[in-house]
Each structure stands twice: as structure tokens, then as C-alpha cells.
Amino acid sequence: MTLAPWEVDLLSLVPALLDSVGKFDPDPAVDRLALRAYPLDEDADDEFRRLLADELQHGRAADRSAFSITVESGVDGVVLSTAEAEAWLRVLAEARLVQAARADLPGGSEKGSDQALFDYLSWVQGSLVEILDEVLP
Amino acid sequence: MIVWNDEVNLAAHVAYVFRRLLGLTRDDATALMLDIHRRGSAMVATGAREHVELTCFRLRTHGLDATLEPA
């Protein structure tokens, strides 16, 4: 995979977008990305979070690191491993959810750079899924 | 475990995640994705608490809106 400089520029916005979650209030993205499993049972939900919060934090950090490193290499051409491609999928899925939660995308009236980033991330994610789907046994 | 419809995740992404994490065939994963899209939600797995909690966690890390209910 070789990325054009403008693609690197767009993808380089993603880590900062994800890092911004929860940095202002209210941020609807916080609720969408929240670690929860038991909407009808507060105690079970708390226990779920307690057990898996560290794993979530470490997983997100690893995914974002793999994403950033491979994006930076993209101008010169980079071959993603399956694990790296899946890290990209998780990062892109989160980024799209953050954008949509904040802007009521898609289907809203948002235009301009946010919409352009959303559309580009959608295209990249769709392309990755197509490739991964072919290699999955 | 229930997965809820959302209007943001790509259909192909959801179907891929079902294949990858639930071990479904391509046809079954696509059918499940479409069922959730049409009906708003679907029960996608049952089983021991530890197992479904881990699967729920993994689905959520891929951006899917998965929740659990006691049997």
C-alpha cells in the first residue's frame, strides 16, 4: 500500500481526533465509545468495566501506535500485516463513530472538511474490509 | 448477547467482524448483519458469562454496539 501525501495528511488527523474524546463537555463521542455491556444492570456493568478497562486502554494504545507508525511509512509504501490491518479497522471504526456522534453523520447536513475526512475514512475502511474478507479462511 | 443496529458502521465491516469473531460463514454473517439492520437488533450469541463477555468486549472494540442480558 502506498499513500499519497494528501492521504497521509488526512490519516494523520485520526490519532488527534481519537485523543480528543472526552476533552470537552459535552462530547457525545464519549458515550458511543464507552465500555459497557449491561445497560439494565449497573452493578454488572461496573464489574465488566473493572475487568476489561485496562485491556481496552492497552488495546487502543497499541492499535493507535500501529496505525500511526504505518501511516508515516505509507508514503514510501508499506505492507500491512493482518494484525496491523485489523488495528487500522478498529481505529477507523472508532474515528468514524466519533465523527458521526459529534456531527450526526452520515445523513446530516455537515459539509466541508469533516465530511471529506469521514468519506475518505469510510473508503479506506471499506477497502481494507474487502481485502481482509478475502484472506479470512 | 445482542447486537444493535447503528447507521454509522459499514455493512461490510459488520459482516466481516461477525465472520472474524463469531466464526460465521460469509453468507451467515451477511444474513445476520441484514437481520440486525432490518429489525434493529438481534441475539447473536448465548453461552457462559465469561465467554460472551469477552466476545462482547471484542465486538465493541470493533465499534459494534453489543450488549448482554442475563439468560
Image (cartoon, grey):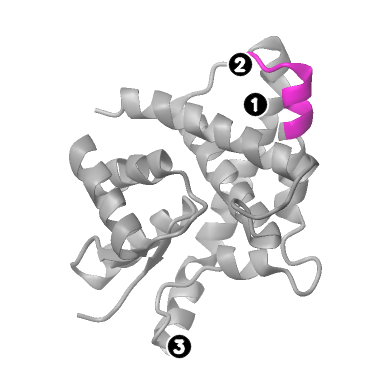
The three-letter code of the residue at mark 3 reads: Glu
Asked whether, in this view, residue A19 is left or right of residue A77, the answer is: right
- Gap between marks 1 and 3 measured at Cα: 39 Å
- Gap between marks 2 and 1 measured at Cα: 7 Å
Q: Residue A42 carries which label?
A: 3
A108 up-or-down from A69: above or below: below
- Whether residue A125 is visible, yes or no, is yes
- Gap between marks 2 and 3 measured at Cα: 45 Å
In which chain is the residue bearing label 2?
Answer: A
Q: Are marks 2 and 3 in contact (CB under 8 Å)?
A: no
Q: Which mark is residue A70?
A: 1
**Residue A60, x across and y down, in percent:** 59, 51
The three-letter code of the residue at mark 1 reads: Thr
User: Do the dots labelled 2 and 3 sit on one chain?
Assistant: yes
- Whether residue B25 is visible, yes or no, is no
Residues drawn in magenta: A2-10
Asked whether, in this view, residue B46 is left or right of residue A124, the answer is: left
Q: Residue furthest front?
A: A109
Q: Report the residue at 31% width, 41% height from top.
A: B20
**Mark 2, other Cα within 10 Å: few <14 / some 14–19 / many ≥20:** some
**Residue B22, x across and y down, in percent:** 25, 49
Circle nearer the N terminus (1, 3): 3
**Residue B31, x across and y down, in percent:** 22, 47
Circle nearer the N terminus (2, 1): 1
The residue beneath circle 2 is: A78
Q: Report the residue at 74% width, 50% height from top.
A: A17
Magenta stretch: residue A65 in it?
no
